[in-house]
Image (cartoon, rainbow, N blue to C red):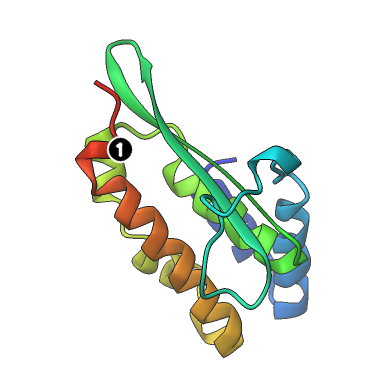
Amino acid sequence: MNFDQIKEDLDLFSEWEDRYGYIIDLGKQVSLPDEMKTDKNKVNGCASQVWLDMNWNISNSSKVFNIEGDSDALIVKGLIAILLSLYKGKTFVEAQAVDPRAEFEKLGLNAHLSSQRSNGLKSMIDQIKIFVNTEDNCVS
């Protein structure tokens, strides 16, 4: 699902409890095989267990960002699904241009996440940004 569709869907709900339910449902589409839940993929700074597997693939002569993730917390899995909608399939230049903090602000989530969840989201975003902005991570 793409980010714009997620935003439209969230806008349909007037109650935050319903929005959280939707975000949890998004997270049900997110998973990583156990062999990808490694220390290398672990996101530090999250209260729950979070893993992000990131790499670049060549598709039609372009470097395309592939990102998958998982968590042991349902709401965090939903946040990962939203991050995936922002990044997955983007070219190197497109991925560098993503401003996930601004995009999450459009969803109005920032004011409704606990401080632990906000810190965990920041840690996930930071890890993605470091990967995306390190050219050494790009395939040649």
**Which residue is drawn at the image coordinates 24% and 49% (left, top)?**
133
Q: Is residue 57 above or below residue 31?
A: above
The residue positioned farthest toward the front in the image shown: 39
- In the rendered view, does 121 fall on the left or right side of 81? left
- In the rendered view, does 89 fall on the left or right side of 99? right
Mark 1, other Cα within 10 Å: few <14 / some 14–19 / many ≥20: few
Query: Is residue 109 shown to the viewer in this render?
Result: no
Q: Secondary structure at mark 1?
A: helix
Image location of residue 61, percent across then percent down: 27, 12
Image location of residue 131, percent across then percent down: 34, 49
Q: Is residue 50 above or below residue 90?
A: below
Q: Nearest the camera: 13 or 137?
A: 137
- In the rendered view, does 29 fall on the left or right side of 104? right
- In the rendered view, does 10 fall on the left or right side of 73? left
Query: Is residue 5 shown to the viewer in this render?
Result: yes
Q: Nearest the camera: 83 or 20?
A: 83
Image location of residue 65, percent across then percent down: 39, 34
Q: Quadrant of the image for the C terminus?
A: top left
Q: Quadrant of the image for the N terminus?
A: top right
Residue position for label 1: 137
**Which residue is drawn at the image coordinates 69% and 62% (left, top)?**
23
Image location of residue 120, percent across then percent down: 54, 74
**Which residue is drawn at the image coordinates 60% and 62% (left, top)?**
79
- Name the kind of residue labelled 1 in the image: Asn
